[in-house]
Amino acid sequence: MAHRLRIGNVTITRIVERDGPWRAPHLMFPTADPAVARAHLRHMEPFIYDPVTDRLVITYQSFLVETPRHRILIDTCVGENKPGRGAHMQYPKEPWLAAFAATGVGFADIDYVFCTHLHVDHVGWNTRLDDGRWVPTFPNARYIFSRAEYEAWRAEDAIGVHESGPHFRDSVLPIVEAGRAILVADDWQLEDQVWLTPTPGHSPAHVCVNIRSNGVHAVFTGDMMHHALQCIEPDWSTCFCADPALAARSRRRVLGDWADRDILVLPTHFPTPTAGRIVSLGDAWRFKFIGG
């Protein structure tokens, strides 16, 4: 299912691959007190948590950003026909394909693909299987990878570290080998309207992607945070974070920068309506969903 919104003269379309209850709060956030988490959740939007199963609602999605000059895809979910993924990623991928098709934009029309980081659920549709070979799904796009992020994963892959896994070899390396990747600094800027913000910790060189149009600012946060609980409890890093303490420092820094400002925040894993703003709440913050 595709969901659209506009900022200035830019159209943003959410392309959902999977959503629904996924993981219990204390499993998602190893340092969380389950009772504290449940107490917070009782006062939060009902669509972000399923009390029956005690699971957080987590969405996997991409964002299609259409500016007057470019068509940009931000994060590419898990993808299809990809071997070696966990059982929880073996869900139907047709919804993503159908939602992308519904935009009226073709794979060949994408100018840039931005990956906030190189985890398995953010790079999957980078490539597709063609006659036994992994080739770029978006043949005319330049893929923007943080150089530091890429080099960290390449070093792990070279020594056979399991975490780098098959997704680096089937969804990242083929892009570089095809000459479609641009390896950039973590504060790289495409133009005045599109730039990166470094937010390391979840992965070695995680970045957020900023878009500005007609004075309106939107930021795509990738996995800087996975759930609205992390605004209220910014020190709760996920079980997937490479450096939980650094991830928490990055989160506190940017939440403090964005709070109480007219900045539209779009976290990859937040469910519909996804977009919202950061509001101060004592010495922490809360996520105010737009329409939520």
Image: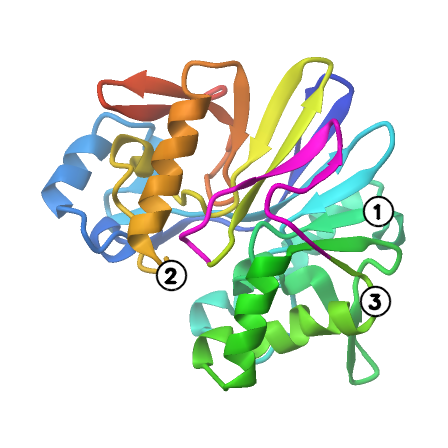
Residue type highlighted by circle 1: Asp
- Name the image quarter holding the C terminus: top left
Q: Residue at x 57, y 78 (%)?
A: 166
Compared to residue 189, the image places residue 5 above or below, namely above
What residue is pinned by disc 3? 179
For the residues marked 2 and 3, what is the alpha-carbon distance in whole angstroms?
28 Å
CB atoms of marks 3 and 1 within 8 Å:
no
Other residues around mark 1 within 10 Å, as few (<14) / some (14–19) / many (≥20): some
In the image, is 192 to the left or to the right of 81? right
Q: Which of marks 3 and 1 is nearer the N terminus?
A: 1
Q: What element carries label 2?
A: loop
Q: Earlier in the sequence, mark 2 or mark 3?
A: 3
Q: Is mark 3 on a helix, strand or loop?
A: loop
Q: Which of 285 and 245 is in front in this view?
A: 245
Q: Few, some or many C-alpha atoms within 10 Å of disc 3 (few <14, some 14-19, many ≥20)?
A: few
> Is residue 33 shown left or right of residue 217?
left
Can you tell which quarter of the image residue 107 is in?
Answer: bottom right
State the separation of the CA atoms marked 3 and 1: 14 Å
x then y, percent, for residue 237? 30, 49
Type of residue at label 2? Answer: Ala
Disc 2 target residue? 242
- The residue tagged with tag 1: helix, strand or loop? loop
Whole-Å distance between the Cαs marked 2 and 1?
A: 30 Å
Q: Give the range drawn in magenta.
A: 183-203
Where residue 3 appears, as percent x and y from the top left, is 64, 33
Residue under the image location 41 percent in, 20 percent down:
259
- Picture coordinates of residue 220 (x, y %)? 57, 37
Q: Where residue 111 is drawn, which disc sits there?
A: 1
Residue 171, disc? none
Q: Which amino acid does label 3 sit on?
A: Gly
